[in-house]
Amino acid sequence: MSPAVRRPSGPLDAESPQPKEGGSAAFRGAGRATSSRRRILTSRQDSEALKLITARSPRRTTGAVLLALAAGACAGTGHGVESSSVVVRAPVTRVRAANLPALRALQNAVEEGADEVARRLVTLLRARPLNDDEEATVAAFERILVGRELIDAIEFRLDLEGEPPRLWLVLVNRSGGPLTLNLPPADLEHLRVTVDAEGLEERNLAARLLDLLRSRELQDAEPVRIELGPVSVPLGSALAARDTWRLSLRSGEVLRDGMAYPAGRLPLPRRERTVVSDSLPDEPVASGELAQALACALATWAVEGNAEAVDGSLLALAVRVPEEERESTLRALLPVLASFPEATLELGARLAPALRWVARTREPGSDLRMWRGWLDAWIRREDARRWRAESQGGLDLPSGAAVPEGLRGASPRGLDLKERR
């Protein structure tokens, strides 16, 4: 790190070991206290983790805990490959009881990702007289919020370009000023799913470690393109192949005007490509087309009474459903399956490959009744997720207003913005 980079000083001396080079996003470090001193181990995916683990000590004030939490949240790097630690070097003054509820609410808001509420709490606390440790705690949480705001202003995306295609990481800084990213190596994962004309699937997962964003400068509104390599993979005898690339970024730092802020809550850039056999048409399949073909297949079975009468054309349609039509396609399939409750397992075995490809799951097997239940549950989850996103996206609490009980999932627990002792 450049000597010119400024970091806040205080009663805590941060010791942040770099993550080991290796591992996958599927693994998370646990961390442990190895000294008789008090230690804070950050064990969530990003550097904003606020889990407290302490060695035994005769006495500990709640104020010291809050201060250590905030400083530990600012000091960590890595997404769980190896935990970071913050060691208390000097006695910590107690946080006063009058400010403790608001500081706890600020901690909860930061933990839960309710950034707008957290910013209002910072403003509320700044209007009060604060001692040095209370000021340090508020400043540490404020740095987390600034880091999140800067990261949210950066677009991370994976692009495929050229022929044969090559994979690129594209970064666009829209923060209004130059930034520098300082992140540990990232995992690039490539999942390939192939299916043959008989409906047999094969999955292959590969991963590699890439050191891409260490001291990477980003000028405002100027895209930065980083080549990740060629991605051409022969289709062979498969009917179709779906390639998915995902870049798992580890938490680190983002620098602005010589100040370093925690770079956590990072996105997972993802890119998908589907390649179909030359024997299939190039035109994509509309959302209702697959549902109509499924209805025809079920009607044929109802008339013929023999699953062998259902051909494999459904799979040839399913592999050509584009990503943007996937949700509407799955929604259209449910009423069709619901209209044939007496379908047999033999019929389900012939239809399941097409359903698996679009749904991207093997869970329901060959039982069409299980597929009806899975589709119904999936649609309910998607509707609930969309409702939560819409209802929380516009959260704007007026100053001095108490948080409604029904918004506890997006706001601090027990927060009372009116409280002033």
Image (cartoon, rainbow, N blue to C red):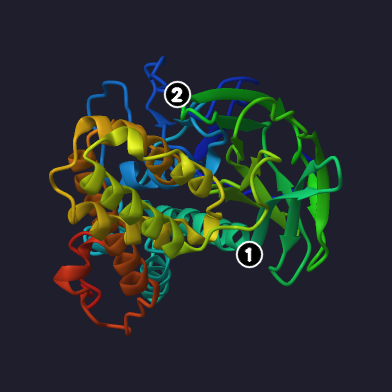
What label does residue 278 carry, if any? none
Check the picture and name the quadrant holding the N terminus. Answer: top right
What residue is shown at x 22% (from left), y 25% (from top)?
58
**Residue 170 seen:** yes
Marked residue nearer the N-terminal end (2 or 1) = 2
Above-or-below relation of 307 to 129: above
Horizontal and vertical percent position of residue 198: 48, 27
Using residue 29 as the reference point, say whether residue 319 is left or right of it. right
Query: What's under tag 1, amino acid-wise?
Result: Ala
* Residue 148 at x, y percent in the picture: 54, 58
Q: Which residue is mark 2?
A: 29
Left or right of residue 221, residue 157 in this image: left
Spot the residue most to the front. Answer: 304
Q: Quadrant of the C terminus?
A: bottom left
Where's residue 358, x and y in %?
A: 44, 46
The answer to whether residue 71 of the structure is visible from this angle is no
Which residue position holds label 1? 153
Q: Residue at horizontal 70%, vertical 68%?
A: 174
